[in-house]
Amino acid sequence: DKGRPVNVKGVYDVERRNAYNNVNIEIFGTGFELDSLVESSLGHHSNGMLLGAGFFNNFIVQLDYPHRKIRLVTRDSLDMGEVANVRADSQQGSGMPIAQVEINGVALWLLVDTGNSGTILIDRRAASKVGLLDKVEGASMSFGANSSGVNEFATSDVVKFGPYEIGDVKVSFPAEGQKTNLESQYERTGSRIGGKRVVGLIGYDLLKDFVVTLDYRYGKLHIALPQ
């Protein structure tokens, strides 16, 4: 069933897209009926659907990046409040999980974007704060949900993510003059996030070595190296 059009905010642009309700899908041999599915271009024709917070809100999701496995866990079988080892929360408005990451010793709040296939992406102000603007190694074209833009990139000395410290992590940020929505993709008000300012996205490059267990609804996050 065709629903009401929605505005889809990507990193570089905002577009109005059609949404659909009562869509029957099968995942892991189990049937689900999903609402508010938004049409989008996902590149190659074999990419049929991008699962996001609307689906994952119903479960605790475990993403084993090194082994390319996904597991859905019910909340009554795992207490994320007990096992969480990353400072995280749920962003008011978007419902997206946010996590605190330290880049070169500076703590930043970033969206945990499991759909971001690239590097950590932060705004230029944050890049300046962590000392990366004078270490630019190059620039590249980046493709968001709706359009593309130019990002510069540099290598950070160390990134602290939960209990782990990772050296030489590539970090991207918009080139000078490149307009983005990074600065507006957060809420300043609301007791649930306490005015935390989100300045970017966590991408695949940081998550790829970990087993990530995530409760989208309540913003609880655990990371571990695979066994």
Image (spheres, helix red, strand yellow):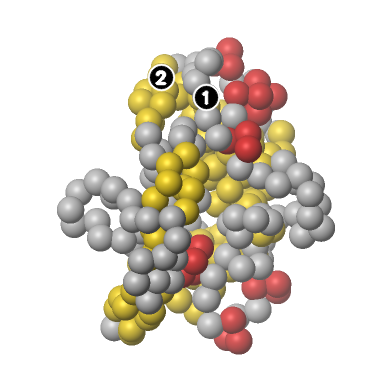
- Location of residue 195 in the rendering, given as x and y in whole percent from the top left corner: 79, 47
Instruction: Give the residue type at disc 2.
Output: Ala
Give the label on residue 35, or none: none
Q: Nearer the viewer, residue 107 or 200?
A: 200
- Location of residue 100 in the rendering, given as x and y in whole percent from the top left corner: 67, 47
Instruction: Give the residue type at disc 1.
Output: Lys
Q: Nearer the viewer, mark 1 or mark 2?
A: 1
Query: In the image, is residue 160 above or below residue 79?
Result: above
Residue at the spot 81% in from the left edge and 58% down from the top edge: 191
Residue at the spot 53% in from the left edge and 45% down from the top edge: 202
Q: Secondary structure at mark 1?
A: loop
In screen coordinates, is 108 left or right of 62? right
In screen coordinates, is 62 left or right of 110? left
The image quadrant that residue 131 belongs to is top right
Q: Which residue is mark 1?
A: 179
Query: In the image, is residue 195 above or below residue 120?
Result: below
Q: Secondary structure at mark 2?
A: strand
Q: Which residue is mark 2?
A: 139
Q: Quadrant of the N terminus?
A: bottom left
Q: Nearer the viewer, residue 214 or 14?
A: 14
Residue at the spot 45% in from the left edge and 17% down from the top edge: 137
